[in-house]
Image: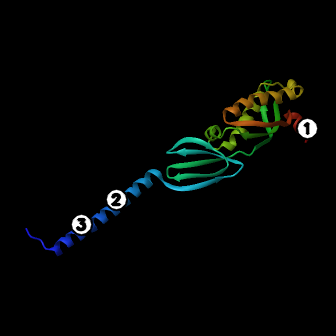
Amino acid sequence: MVTTSGSANDLRSELDSMTIAAIVWAVLILTWVLRANLGAPSSFTLLQHQRGLLYRRGKPVREVCAGQHRVWVGVEKILFIDIRPITVSFENRAVTLTDGATAMYGFSGTAEVDDAKKALYCAGNYNDMPAFVLLCCARLVLNSQNSIGLLAKHAAIVEEIMNRAKPRLSAAGFRLLTFRMTQLGLAAQARAEK
């Protein structure tokens, strides 16, 4: 079969344009596949009072400190946690003692995040954990007291609450900084003072 040079050039031109179109499509598909698997680059800045936990494909990879961090959006994520001290204060709480009397108490305390990973996993909102632990420990210790020994053992009660709270907070990724009873007395005395 005899072909003319014009039709050969047309065929070559048509193959070249098809090759270019195939290459363009291959690059587009490759870009789409890589973007789906690697994500888009982005950066996050953590302040001095923040820590974070870097997740890659839904699994925790490492804890990150203050500074700028590059992540691949869609594949990696940083969950932030504020490590400034958390202040807790409760007043005019009532608790029943072992002899049936009612005691009024109040306390204040401060805790800070010691382990960001534990703190993130300890509760739905990690800021609520110190308040919950201190309140539970205070009620546990005060429930085991009677009305006679309540006022006589004020310092021992505070010490026992702290000793019960410290390991529980530590297990949740916190460290107890301060704790003090701001109010402690029998309910009848509290009403008489008003």
Residue at point 40%, 57% (across, down): 32
Query: Which of the two residues, 80 or 29, is positioned nearer the viewer here?
Result: 29
Whether residues under marks 3 and 1 lie with C-beta atoms below 8 angstroms apart, the answer is no
Query: Which of the two residues, 176 or 11, is positioned nearer the viewer here?
Result: 11
Q: Nearer the viewer, mark 3 or mark 1?
A: 3
Whether residue 69 can be seen here: yes
Quick check: 67 above or below 177?
A: below
Q: Quadrant of the C terminus?
A: top right
Whether residues under marks 2 and 1 lie with C-beta atoms below 8 angstroms apart, the answer is no
Which of the 4 image quadrants contains residue 119?
top right
x and y, in percent, of residue 59 in the image: 52, 41
Q: Which residue is mark 3?
A: 15
Distance from Cα at disc 3 to Cα at disc 1: 101 Å
Which of the 4 image quadrants contains residue 163?
top right
Q: Quadrant of the N terminus?
A: bottom left
Q: Nearer the viewer, mark 2 or mark 3?
A: 3
x and y, in percent, of residue 187 in the image: 84, 34
Amino acid type of the residue tagged 1 in the rendering:
Ala
Quick check: 27 above or below 145?
A: below
- Of all residues, the one furthest to the left in this rendering is 1
Amino acid type of the residue tagged 2 in the rendering:
Ala
x and y, in percent, of residue 180 in the image: 83, 36
Which of the 4 image quadrants contains residue 137?
top right
Residue at point 64%, 44% (across, down): 125
Looking at the image, residue 137 sits to the left or right of residue 186; the answer is: left
Closer to the N terminus: mark 2 or mark 3?
3
Q: Residues within 10 Å of mark 1 (few under 14, many from 20)?
A: few
Q: Which residue is mark 1?
A: 192
Q: Which residue is mark 2?
A: 26
Q: Nearer the viewer, mark 2 or mark 1?
A: 2
x and y, in percent, of residue 171 in the image: 67, 32
- Secondary structure type for disc 1: helix
